[in-house]
Amino acid sequence: MAENKIESQQTPRRVYVDYNATTPLKPAVKAAVIEDLEVYGNASSMHASGRLAHARVEQARSAVEKLLGAPAGTVIFTSGGSESNNTVFQAMRRLASGPDGRPLAAGRNEFITTAIEHPCVLNSAQYLKSLGFKVIILPVDGYGKLRMDELQKVLSDKTLFVSVMAANNEIGTIQNIKEIAGMARAAGAWMHTDAVQAVGKIPLSVEDLGVDYLTMSAHKIYGPKGVGALYVRKGAPLSALIHGGHQEDGLRAGTYNNIGILGFGRAAAIAAAEVETYGREISALRDRLRAGLAAAIPSIKINGHPDDLLPNTLNVSFPGAEGEAILLSMDIMGIEASTGSACASGSLEPSHVLLAIGVGPELAHGSIRFSLGWGNSAGDIDYIIETLPPIIARLRAMSTLTPDAVH
Ligand SMILES: Cc1ncc(COP(=O)(O)O)c(C=O)c1O
């Protein structure tokens, strides 16, 4: 009917492909969270309501530990990935500081990370640098992989801490954390991985990886926002970022965020059960998108590692078109993607990750991250493949840049 046609034109199909920015609650998590709203007691209180909340928080902790293949009592809850990363960086800073707070002149006082980390790691590293600590930011290769020879060159008996992300949020490249952790530990350094984008998307276990610290976040695995976790290997040093009460053995003060933590636990249990299926089904959608775009749009460039890639992430450069314009045109057609990490969008700086893998600033500005998830169907992917070519053709026709002018 004509009325329906107008209706569908006004409200185009919505295709959310920005799951690396955040995920919706899975229906099962949402139902559980609604139920969990009833658990209102303070988990530190002695009475029955407090004891119930405490028991449920511990149940959630077990679910998160199980997802990470971690022994009981090795995970602390935080407000998210940013806080977990800051906590471990600041704990390391204290280890490398003298009583006056200044960097120790002798002993282990050097920090190593990579050029493609999330801003919450890079800015933590930058802060330590501003305090006078030696911070080494390692380059990556054209696929976003850390070069082991570069790491080996800088590891020494001065290295205190190595932090390398398990998978990149913008291009999806997966690092060989097991090998990196082995090298860091052989050099006597503490090893941390920011696994916010890897957990729930690829099978992993802290025991197998051999890391001392691992960061994760609930809202990337279909759990609530504002809650995350830090795995701390038994015996690895940690001190509090937030001081106050005795919660989390004094390592993270503040009344337990029952609702967030319980939702996180539910999401973690589901993610553990579904990680294999996720890998199979979501990577099939990603491959369909990659092949479809490559066939339909001339001169595109796919960024990221061809094989060691998150099942859900596809970063594409469209020479001759501008990223923000592509994004807005797609949004009008109901497609929600991203030009880079959500935290960096709004900034006119080209993505530091794309620059680090050798994409020029102009091409970096014309790059889109598609990050898929459980809500997507093959029909959604086909809709993107149909909708995007005329958008790119129109923007290229309007642009002073030609596909050939961009490198
Ligand atoms: C790799 C990575 N680390 C850390 C974070 C920050 O996590 P949160 O949003 O929970 O603070 C993000 C979020 O985008 C991320 O992608």
Image (cartoon, rainbow, N blue to C red):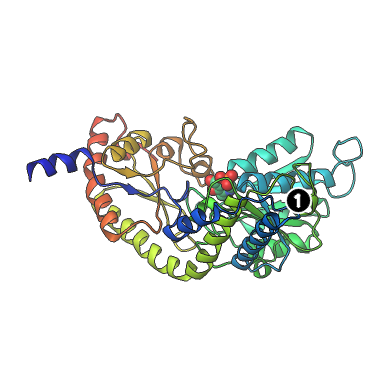
Q: Residue at x 81, y 59 (%)?
A: 188
Quarter of the image that includes the C terminus: top left
Q: Is residue 266 visible?
A: yes
Task: From the top left corner, tell me how far across and down residue 204 is, in percent.
Answer: 58, 66
- Would residue 16 appear left or right of 1 to someone viewing this image? right
20 up-or-down from 265: above or below: above
Q: Residue furthest right?
A: 99
Tell me if 181 is positioned left or right of 312 in this view: right
Residue at the spot 62% in from the left edge and 51% down from the top edge = 258
Measuring from the top left, give residue 330's x and y in whole percent: 30, 40
In the image, is residue 20 above or below residue 274?
above
- The outermost residue toward the left is 1
Q: Position of residue 211 (x, y in %)?
A: 70, 62
Tell me which amino acid carries mark 1.
Gln
- Confirm if mark 1 falls within 8 A of ligand 1: no
Report the side of 92 relative to 313 (left or right): right
Quadrant of residue 49 within the rendered picture:
bottom right
Q: Position of residue 183 (x, y in %)?
A: 72, 62
Q: How many marks?
A: 1
Mark 1 Cα shell of 10 Å, populated few (<14), some (14-19), many (≥20): some
Which residue is depicted at the point 51% across and 55% down? 33
Mark 1 residue element? helix
- Residue furthest to the front in view is 48
Q: Is residue 320 visible?
A: no
Residue in front for this viewpoint, 88 or 270? 270
Tell me the residue that label 1 is attached to. 247
State the residue in front, 127 or 228. Answer: 228
Q: Which residue is at the front of the view, 71 or 324?
A: 71
